[in-house]
Image (tube, rainbow, N blue to C red):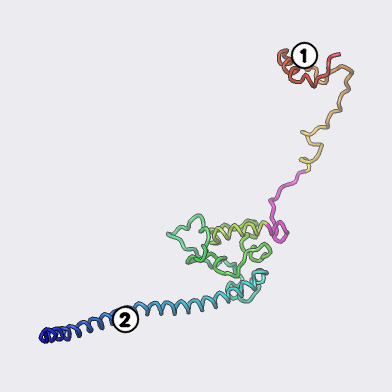
Amino acid sequence: MAASLQRIGIVISRTFPIILQRNIQAQRIRHWKLTSSASPVLSLNFRALTSSSSSSSDNSDSTETLSRYSDRPWEYLESEEYIERYGSKPVWSNYRRNHKGGVPPQKTRKTCIRGDKICGNPCPICRDPNIIVHYKNVNLLQQFVSPQTGIVYDPTRTGVCMKQQKLLNKAIETARDCGLLSAQLPHVDYSKEDYSNTHGAVAPTPAPFSLSSGELWYPWYGSIKPDERELARVRRIYKDYLKPDV
């Protein structure tokens, strides 16, 4: 009995350090995995915090700028910020579109901003949040209208996306209706002969001739004889409304 207990003790003493060492190694591996997996998370969280703080500051700045020019967008074109950025040139003068190949496409992109995603090279209006299309923003609308012909520039020339181009067309039309933009009408040569009564194709209306009693206005009308069956059918339909023959 004592020998068996001694053997059991020897086996436990020999196996226990191995088991303990294995447990220690497993705990170290688990701890290493947790730390290695937690470190990028912490770094990502730190980056997210820094980016959120920077984005919040940017958003606060953007909201401040938008709050300054959202009610009166035409004031931005008179500010020093606009003059430093664009000078006296239109907002689309230095813009270059991104397209494949040497020939640009016939149409611009549908929109530059889809939800929270902004394309890599937004159009001249979408890239600057202070530029707001409004029918009272005449200085901006004049940059997209030809001063010689009064025709709105094609978006393939200005690079504006189709969404902003629709807003521009509507704002220009409204500004012309309100008299803020001049509308150039085509020149038409006026000829007095086209509006005078002395023209060769214009003659005075003849006076109506007098008719005697019983005479018809059209002489050929009296020679027309109606169909008896059709006349009987009409009389049968409207018999309640016809006066009786005297």
Residue in the picture at 83% in, 32% down: 204
57 lies above or below 6? above
Q: Mark 2 or mark 1: which comes first in sequence?
A: 2
Give the numbered dot on residue 193.
none
The residue at which mark 2 appears reads as 31
Identity of the residue furthest to the front in this view: 1
The residue at which mark 1 appears reads as 223
Q: Nearer the viewer, residue 82 or 34?
A: 34
- Asked if one can make out residue 115 in the rendered structure from this viewpoint, the answer is yes
Q: Nearer the viewer, residue 215 or 102?
A: 215
194 lies above or below 113? above
Q: Is residue 171 magenta?
A: no
The image quadrant of residue 211 is: top right
The reply to whether dot 2 and dot 1 touch (C-beta < 8 Å) is: no
Instruction: Please state the horizontal and vertical placement of residue 123, each as a whole percent of the image.
Output: 53, 64
- Asked if one can make out residue 142 in the rendered structure from this viewpoint, the answer is no
Q: Is residue 59 left or right of residue 149?
A: left
Instruction: Please state the horizontal and vertical placement of residue 66, each as a whole percent of the image.
Output: 61, 71
Instruction: Please state the horizontal and vertical placement of residue 148, each as a whole percent of the image.
Output: 65, 58
Q: Is residue 190 left or right of residue 97?
A: right
Q: Nearer the viewer, residue 175 or 63?
A: 63
Q: Could you tell me the amino acid type at mark 1?
A: Ser
222 lies above or below 19? above
Q: CA distance from mark 2 to mark 1?
A: 118 Å
First to last magenta residue range: 174-191
- The quarter in which the N terminus is drawn is bottom left
